[in-house]
Image (spheres, helix red, strand yellow):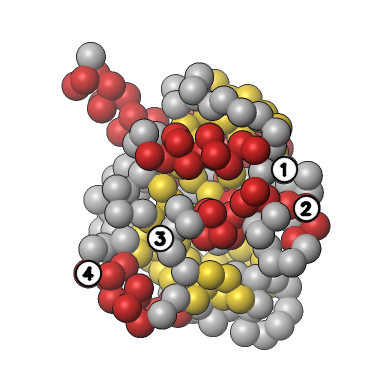
Amino acid sequence: MKFAVIVFPGSNCDVDMFHAIKDELGEEVEYVWHDTDNLDQYDGILLPGGFSYGDYLRSGAIARFSNVMKEVVKAAEAGKPVLGICNGFQILLESGLLPGAMRRNESLQFICHTVELMVANNRTMFTSLFNEREIIRIPIAHGEGNYYCDEATLEQLQANNRIVFTYTNNPNGSVSDIAGIMNEKGNVLGMMPHPERAVDELLGSADGLKLFQAIVRNWREAHVVNA
């Protein structure tokens, strides 16, 4: 499986993501610059954390207009797995690939520590290797991770099992403890915590590696069936 790590001006977790895929997962991966106009050669698309375009206006608001985002939308519509982490999640929200918005953390402070997440839905291409309601340890690092959506959107997310991860001790004030959500088709996941920073016990946790392994396993199973 071949992954693209999308690099925007201001991305700073792209190297972490690259390392997770190449060295821990053992899959093919390339950095792809924000002005790229074709992602056809890639099987999975990864939007890393950071401060794209300096987070001017709102986090992800400028990156949403980058040339490559047209291709990210195209890949999502084609059913390819698309994962946005932290700033990548914010970009997915700004681009309309996921519903809702991000606000400043309730504390109005940047927070950076390891949190416990509950796997709210383990029947996805991203979480199929986790147990239902499994508690995992993943780092967070954000100033605008307070997920918000209106009541109608929240009801839709809940009714369709599109809330994938929730915080056990909500660190930022997110609606309904939400840490990660997916689209209706189930191939686009946005999450604030950083699984790419939890792929080896030397980092304090290897819980995040299962997420990337699940993507690869489900992608390969789908392509064997369709071959």
Which amino acid does the dot numbered 4 rest on? Ala
Work out whether mark 2 precedes mark 3 in sequence or the reverse, and give the earlier one. Answer: 2
Between the residue at mark 2 and the residue at mark 3, the CA separation in whole angstroms equals 24 Å
Foreground residue, 163 or 35?
35
Q: Secondary structure at mark 2?
A: helix
Going by the image, does 184 lie left or right of 170? left
Work out whether mark 4 precedes mark 3 in sequence or the reverse, and give the earlier one. Answer: 4
Callout in the foreground (2, 3): 2
Between the residue at mark 1 and the residue at mark 4, the CA separation in whole angstroms equals 34 Å
Residue 173 in the image, given as x and y percentages of width and height = 54, 82
Between the residue at mark 4 and the residue at mark 3, the CA separation in whole angstroms equals 13 Å
Between the residue at mark 1 and the residue at mark 3, the CA separation in whole angstroms equals 22 Å
Q: Secondary structure at mark 4?
A: helix
Q: Residues within 10 Å of mark 3 (few under 14, many from 20)?
A: many
Which amino acid does the dot numbered 1 rest on? Phe
Q: Name, please, the residue furthest toward the bottom.
A: 107
Q: Which residue is mark 1?
A: 8
Query: Where residue 159 is drawn, which disc sits there?
Result: 4
Q: Secondary structure at mark 1?
A: loop
Residue 158 in the image, given as x and y percentages of width and height = 28, 71
Callout in the foreground (2, 4): 2
Q: Which residue is mark 3?
A: 181
Query: Where residue 214 is drawn, which disc sits there?
Result: none
Residue 159 in the image, given as x and y percentages of width and height = 22, 69
